[in-house]
Image (cartoon, rainbow, N blue to C red):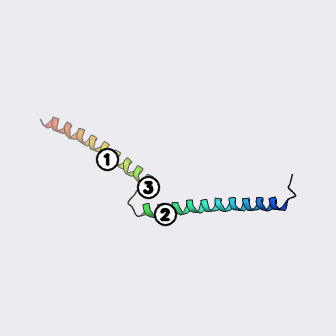
Amino acid sequence: MQSQNPLIADFVKLANSAAGTLAGMGREARDAARERAKETFGGMDFVSREEFDAVKMMAGKAREEAEDLKARVAALEAKIK
């Protein structure tokens, strides 16, 4: 049921416009904050998750190889003595 009062119709239009404007301002503020954060953190020496995981995997493999070599050296030293 629509109101026949033009004053109420104008008020509803104004309220809808204000709500849309506030929502747009909120989106713009959020996007601006994200951009500022990217600029701030972009200058720092952070690594991506993929780079971190790759280096972590390489370190684990190197650790395993070092343990294997350690065992081989111990076995060779046991043969010498």
**Residue found at x 47% / y 60%:** 37
| Callout 1 secondary element | helix
Q: Are marks 3 and 1 in contact (CB under 8 Å)?
A: no
Residue where numbered disc 2 is placed = 36
Q: Position of residue 6 (x, y in %)?
A: 84, 62
The disc placed on residue 48 is 3
First reached walking from the N terminus: tag 1 or tag 2? 2
Residue 24 location, x and y as percent?
64, 62
- In the rendered structure, which amino acid carries the disc numbered 1? Ala
Q: CA distance from mark 2 to mark 3?
A: 18 Å
Disc 2, SS: helix
> Could you tell which of marks 3 and 1 lies nearer the N-terminus?
3
Q: Is residue 80 above or below residue 17?
A: above
Residue lying at 37% horizontally and 48% vertically, measured from the top left: 56
Give above or below for 56 relative to 32: above
Give above or below for 64 relative to 49.
Answer: above
Residue closest to the far left = 81
Left or right: 79 as drawn, with respect to 37: left
The residue carrying pointer 3 sits among few (fewer than 14), some (14 to 19) or many (20 or more) residues within 10 Å by Cα, namely few
Viewer-nearest residue: 58 or 68? 58
Tell me the residue that label 1 is attached to.
62
Q: Quadrant of residue 76?
A: top left
Residue mark closest to the camera, 1 vs 2? 2
Tell me how far mark 3 sits from mark 1, CA to CA: 21 Å
Q: Earlier in the sequence, mark 2 or mark 3?
A: 2
Q: Position of residue 28 (x, y in %)?
A: 59, 63
The circle on residue 3 is none
